Image (tube, rainbow, N blue to C red):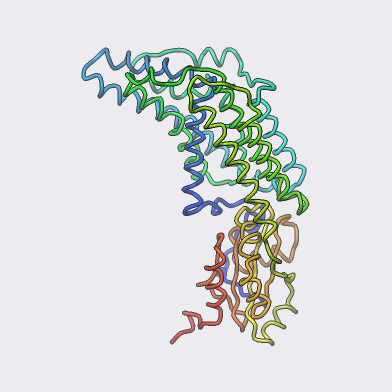
Amino acid sequence: MPVNSSPAGQTPPVEAAAATPDSRSLQGWAMALTLLGIFAGGLALNLTPCVYPMIPITVSFFGGRADREKPGQIRLVAHGLCYLMGLAMTNSTLGVVAAFTGGLMGGMLQNPLVLAVVAGVLVLFATSLFGFWELRLPGALTQMAGKSYGGYFGSLFMGLTLGVVAAPCIGPFVLGLLTWVAGMGNPWFGFLIFFTLSLGLGLPLFVLALFSGQLQRLPRAGGWMNWVRNLMGWVLVGMAVYFIRPILPELFKIGLPVAVALAAGLHLGWFDQNKAGFKAFPWLKTLVGTACLVLAAFWVTSYAMRGPGIVWHSYSEQVLQESMAREKPVIIDFYADWCTPCRELEEVTFHHPDVVRLAEEDVTMIKVDVTKGDNPLHQQLLAEYDIKGVPTIVFLDTEGKERMDLRLVDFLAPEQFLSHMAGLKNRSPESSP
């Protein structure tokens, strides 16, 4: 009989737990690396054909504001901060609004057709960055965004409207990012992601404005900026694979990401014919192309060397009773296909030889797949175990009582997971004298 750990009279949000992707998948180093990647993406957007030509215009704008009154450098910093604030306000608001659709988006992401449509839209935006078509906003909106105002409000307004002016280049990437944030459904996460993107996009302009004398050292505009657009296009294709992967057959789950990495590496590293006036550009292309090929090779090697995984049981009272009769502890994995750390646990931790061996010998392993969220038994289990989201891994001792001190709500490496499995043999802290 499952243990009801919910407080009396409290009904946990079962539907949300079963339906909505959880931003808990990004914590610790995963969150830090994600934010670093988003910041790098913002930096890269400065090198697109729509934004790069604005650098001297922006620097001249700040310089003109600062020269009107002394001390110029202090006023320059103030104008730059206003500009960054305006840029962050626009993008962060978009992120928060997108995240508030998370419950709706998360429910829709259970539908394979919706996942296919989202992936298709991302690929469509990617083709815009590849140059097959161009995203254009209404002329009146672009004209309004291009107006210039005086004082600190002028700097704020310039930051607020940068996204409109540069929409043909940064719009597809931002829209793809919005789709991802909406799937997470966490407003704070949406704000943080787009605030970080804004820093990456606006910080180089701010720094160049402070040190405007270094402007002449920048590379001249040229075809290399189209290479940067192609790079961002492949990022969107990778995001499309991220969305479509849960509904693919097992072979394609590894085959499609590998194919995309290979295609991106060959295109960006060697097939792309764009040129640049600085000597480091060919080395940069080769470095990026090689990194993509190495990534593809790493995925293939990891998959080929992966051993057999854990043999899971479906949940039933009979399985629990048999485990208690044999004095075997139980581990219940609440899982969903759209959950990134769930898949990481399955592909890494639950295929580790030591984890598999210990699971076969000493533990009964049960998986509750809540991907579709329409199973009445699963709904009941979510409520009785007070599951707020996935992944959640519940550890039951030999008497069928949950060890709350061992419960997991995120990815855990095999070595740490083995410690949790061994901890089932120890006495629960609650039952210690």
In the rendered image, the residue lying farthest to the left is 71
Q: Is residue 101 left or right of residue 165?
A: right
Q: Residue at position x 36%, y 14% from top?
A: 150
Q: Residue at position x 49%, y 83% from top?
A: 431
Q: Nearer the viewer, residue 402 or 6?
A: 402
Residue 86 lies, in percent from the top left, at: 42, 27
Q: Is residue 363 left or right of residue 145?
A: right
**From what the image shows, is residue 277 above or below residue 323?**
above
* Image quarter hosting the N terminus: bottom right
Q: Which quadrant of the view contains residue 332? A: bottom right
* Image quarter hosting the C terminus: bottom left
Residue 114 lies, in percent from the top left, at: 74, 42
Residue 288 lies, in percent from the top left, at: 56, 36
Q: Residue at position x 51%, y 51% from top?
A: 30
Q: How many marks?
A: 0
Q: Nearer the viewer, residue 40 or 368?
A: 40
